[in-house]
Each structure stands twice: as structure tokens, then as C-alpha cells.
Image (cartoon, rainbow, N blue to C red):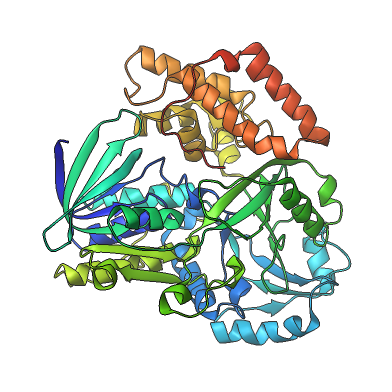
Amino acid sequence: MPAGAEVDVVVIGGGATGAGVLRDLAMRGLSATLVERGDFASGTSGRYHGLLHSGARYVESDPISARHCIEENAVLRRIAPGTIEPTGGYFVATPDDPDDYLDRFPAACAKAGIETEPVPLDELFRAEPLLSREIRAAYRVPDAALEPWELVDGTLNSAREHGATAHRYRAVIGFERDADGSVAAVMTRDTRTGEEETIACRAVVSAAGAWAGQIAELAGARLTMSPGKGSMLIFNRRFSTAVINRLAPPGDGDILVPVHTVCILGTTDITGEDPDDAVVTEEEISALLADGERLVPGISGARVLRAYAGSRPLYDADEVSGAASHDESREISRAHHVIDHGARDGVGGLWSIVGGKLTTYRLMARDVTDAVAAALGNDAPCRTADEPLPEPAGHSPYWLGDRLAAIEAEGGGDADLVCECELVTRQRLADALDRRADSSLDDLRRTTRLGMGPCQGAFCMPRAAAMLDARRADGRLHPAAPDANVALRSFAAERLRGTRPIAWGDQLTELFLTAGIFRGTLGTDALPEHTGGDDAAS
């Protein structure tokens, strides 16, 4: 296996936390590189409900996590405003929600430092006319919608500006250790080309989330994760302008988040063993829709675009301490934990950062980087809360009409759209390919929202595949990028996986249309099988 680079720290995992760690390390002057087995933010960071937490959800069940959320909520609004739509949020009490929780909620929020304001019901229903008229109380909280892919992209761009490097489709396959048991190098394999590389280092940070236990095991350490599967439903339109939460202890189907042109209803919470086996069941879909009826009557008859699930990176600290571990994943704290495997397992130079929320990714990165930097003799302070992120994190809050306004500013009629649903122009797609010439169609979806609208790629994917093919022909596509036909078949299969569980009514009609385009007109079933590392996320 050929030797590769030598750095101070290797970061494993290209989600929000890993990107945050890379940025923090680089800003402190440490040389660092990141490796991710799939695309950036293709794991849990790209498979959540799109909420910038106020922390109000956890004021009673997990007050530490609640305080972390509200503090980082303010930080992210300052350093990454372009990734946030300031929708605001409401906690609303339905007839099924307990009176005692409603009574305790304002004081619990105040104790956690979360600003709340009671909202008269007539004002609530004017602002959100589709909500159930059986709602009997409401409080306003500083929730918002958060775009994960642009947040991760901006964080990685900042890390690169400070000298770090990041590599996607690079899986960790092992570690080299010194005679004293400390980690000396990370062995990786390119999941597309098969090329292997060893990266020498002084320390390793595992930010692999729900997969952190697998990474620890490769290094000879122990880490038992308790992945909590969360299933969600995407509807073809917004039912609210603000985030809507049920005013009750955390449960299934208790939140509705407006994200771009759609809204997301979630979530379930089921303890699992394999974070890669996040399959949405019919029972979960039925339960989510029934719970959603308490917030928006008639939502169970609305058009669902797709179902998807993610694996929460939960870590039950009680298991290690000897206390009785929790039976249900909702009982496990959402607070984060920094684990020094040198002190605990004799594997020096290896740290894991687990737990937490996407909202608290920067804080998680700070805490683990503090520990690593101290061990390496670096006393530079953390500056990640003070310096804004570069593009695409932006300098002003996200506005739903941004793309349309930009197109109209240049004439509108000649926009040359590839994706009508998400207003993705040919130029936007070309720019994305210029930045990452090794992209698949699913990578472009994360970068541009290509294929994420009501047609789920039925009309835009063939056009995008043609662009990929043209770029390969003229030499502008990276050799590691999948063939356009392979990418098209892979994308079609992933979209089908998310739409099959909700194929009824209008969505069943859409599924037949999409299947006719992909299988009938384009013959995708006869295209080459996908063999690369394109780990799709919804």
C-alpha cells in the first residue's frame, strides 16, 4: 500500500461535525485532512428534518442539549445566515397533549435560556390557517429551517482556506499503530477506483456519527453506539410558514418543518443495530400520517413525495458507567460526548465525538478539537464562533424566492432550466460540475437540489445525465466520476426506493409516469449496474 500524506490530524466522517472539526483544527494552525466514505453530508447530516433547533423540544427531557441548541442557534445565524430560513416556530397544544406539560413549558424554556412568547389563537390561525382549530394554546420559539448541504460545503470551504484538505469517497479500511498502541496512520481506499493510501498522522478524530463504533473497532478500541432510526415524510408543498411542534414530551410525528418548497413531517425514533439499514416501514408511515392529522387536518390525504430515514448518532453513556442502559432511544440524551480512546482503551491518539444534533455541530467540533489540540501541544483558541463561513453559507438569510428573483433579474424567459421544480439552471449545474468534476447525479442533487421537487427527477435527470456525458466526451469530467448511464440508473433506483412506500393516490400516478420515463423511454433497467460509492441521501 503506497504511503500518502502526513498530517497532524486525520478526521473521519464528512458530515457537519467532521467538517466542523476539520475547520477548527485548520484555524488553530494544525495540518489536517478529512476522509469520507461517500459524498459529503450523505449520512445523517443529509437525512434529517431540516430543523435549526431552538432547544425547546428538550427543555424537560434533556436540558443540557436544550441549552446547547439555543446557544448554537444564535451562533449559526451569525456565521452561516445563508443556510438558514428564519421561519420561526410554534409549540402548539393539541387536545391529546398533557395539561401539566403545557403548564411547565414556559418556565422550563426560561431556565434553558430559550425565549418564548404566548401567541393568541386567533393570531396563530391567521398566520397558519391550515392548523387544526382544536389547538388550544401556542408559544412562539426561535426555531428555523436549516440547509445541511450548504452548511457542510461552507464549513469545508473555510477549512480549505486555512490549509486543510477533504476527500470524499475515501473509506477507512484500517489503522497502523505504534509499539505503544497509539495510532500512527490511517489506511484508506477510494471506493470508486479501489486505490489505497496510507495517511501518517499524530492523531485521529472519528466524527463518523452512527458509524463511530465501526471505526473504533477497526482501531482496536470499543465504542457501542445506539443508532436511533428516524423516519420522515416529504410533502409536495408547505402546510405552514413556520416550524410547528406539538407541545408535549418528544414523540413520533410531532414536528412539521417547511424546507424550501416542501415540508417534512417527522419523526419516528426506533433503536437499531445497523445504521445502514434505515428502511421506512408502512407502519411508520401510517403512524406519522395519523399523528400529523393532529396538527394539520387532512394531511394524511395530501401528496407525499417520498419517505426517508436517517440514523441518529446516539451514545448511551450509562452503559459504560455500569448503570442500566436505556431501552428506548428517546431516553438517551442528545448531548454530545468526547471520548479519549487512549485514556479509556489504550489506543492513544484516537478520539471519537458522538451524540449531539446538527444544530450543535460547531460546539461538538470545538470540544473535541480542544482535547486534541491540548494533547498535541497547541494552545490556539477556538475562533469558529467568531468568523463567518464563506459561500455557499452566504451573508444574508435564505429567502424562498432567491432563485426566482435571480433568474428574473437576468431576463427570466431565457433561464435555460434543467430542473423546473427547483429552478436549477444549466449554468448552476455547470458551475457545480466545475467545482466538483467527479460528481454523480446524486452528488449534484445535494449540491443544487436537482431532482428534489415534485417530479423527483423524472424530467431533469435525463437532461443532467446528458450534460455529464457531454463533459466526459470533451474531457471535463473527472475519471473517477461514474458513467452517465450508471449514474442515471443509480439515481432512478434511489428515487424509487423513497417513493415505493408511499405509492398511493396522486403519488402512485406520479410513480407510474416516472417508471414509464425511466424504464420505458430511457430503458434504465438495461443500463449498467451501479458499482461505485454513491451513497445517496434523501
Relative image position of residue 249 (x, y in whole percent): 69, 74
Q: Residue at x 55, y 32 (%)?
A: 424
Q: Is residue 91 left or right of residue 277?
A: right
Q: Is 396 located above or below residue 432 in the figure? A: below
Q: Residue at x 37, y 64 (%)?
A: 353
Q: Quadrant of the N terminus?
A: top left
Is residue 382 something one can see in this rendering? no
Relative image position of residue 450 (x, y in whole percent): 55, 33
Number of marks in the image?
0
Relative image position of residue 325 (x, y in whole percent): 52, 74
Please identify the residue farthest to the left as the structure is shown.
179
Is residue 33 something one can see in this rendering? yes
Q: Quadrant of the C terminus?
A: top right
Q: Is 309 located above or below residue 256 in the figure? A: above
Q: Is 308 located above or below residue 442 in the figure? A: below
Front residue of 174/521: it is: 174
Q: Is residue 404 left or right of residue 368?
A: right
Please identify the residue farthest to the right as the structure is shown.
134
Q: Residue at x 46, y 69 (%)?
A: 72
Q: Is residue 286 left or right of residue 431?
A: right
Relative image position of residue 487 (x, y in whole percent): 48, 24
Q: Is residue 88 left or right of residue 180?
A: right
Q: Residue at x 68, y 36 (%)?
A: 499
